Amino acid sequence: MGRVNKTSLRDEFDHLKSEFARLSASNKISSESMVLFKAMFMLFEVMIAVFLEKQTKKIVRIRAFPPLRQEKMKVQLSLALIARARKRMV
């Protein structure tokens, strides 16, 4: 997988946003284009925030039931699925 320099990507994106702001302030961009570009900038900001996040958060699962009870629940679920499948066959 290729690597991207995160700071340069963010800097380039900020530069594009400031250039867009300058052009829109001088009325060189139509109102339809302004709406489109603002929506695209928002989408790209979300993508940059998600994909260039420095840390990934580890999901910790807390077991609500003790292991023995979990095994019993799995068996009960399996039996229920088997019973449902048999009913469908009849």
Image: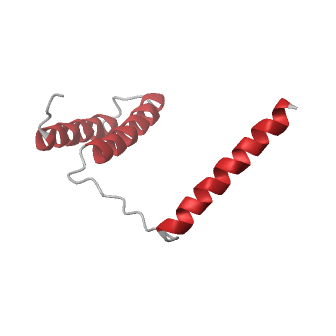
Q: Residue furthest right?
A: 90
Instruction: Say which of 84 and 45 sits in front.
Output: 84
Q: What scheme was used to colour the molecule?
A: secondary structure
Q: Residue drawn at (43%, 38%), measured in percent from left and top? A: 39
Instruction: Say which of 51 and 32 sits in front.
Output: 51
In the displayed structure, 44 sits above or below 80; it is above
Q: Residue drawn at (66%, 56%), measured in percent from left and top? A: 76
Res 83 quadrant in image: top right
Q: Quadrant of the N terminus?
A: top left
Q: Is residue 11 left or right of residue 58?
A: left
* Residue 71 spot, x, y in % from top left: 54, 60
Q: Is residue 77 left or right of residue 86?
A: left
Q: Quadrant of the C terminus?
A: top right
* Residue 57 spot, x, y in % from top left: 30, 57
Q: Is residue 79 left or right of residue 59?
A: right
In the displayed structure, 21 sits above or below 58; it is above
Q: Residue drawn at (26%, 40%), measured in percent from left and top? A: 17
Instruction: Count how many numbered circles sit on residues in the image.
Output: 0
Q: Residue drawn at (65%, 48%), measured in percent from left and top? A: 78
* Residue 80 spot, x, y in % from top left: 72, 49
Instruction: Say which of 24 and 68 sits in front.
Output: 68
* Residue 55 spot, x, y in % from top left: 22, 54
In the displayed structure, 69 sits above or below 44; it is below
Q: Is residue 50 left or right of residue 32?
A: left
Res 88 quadrant in image: top right
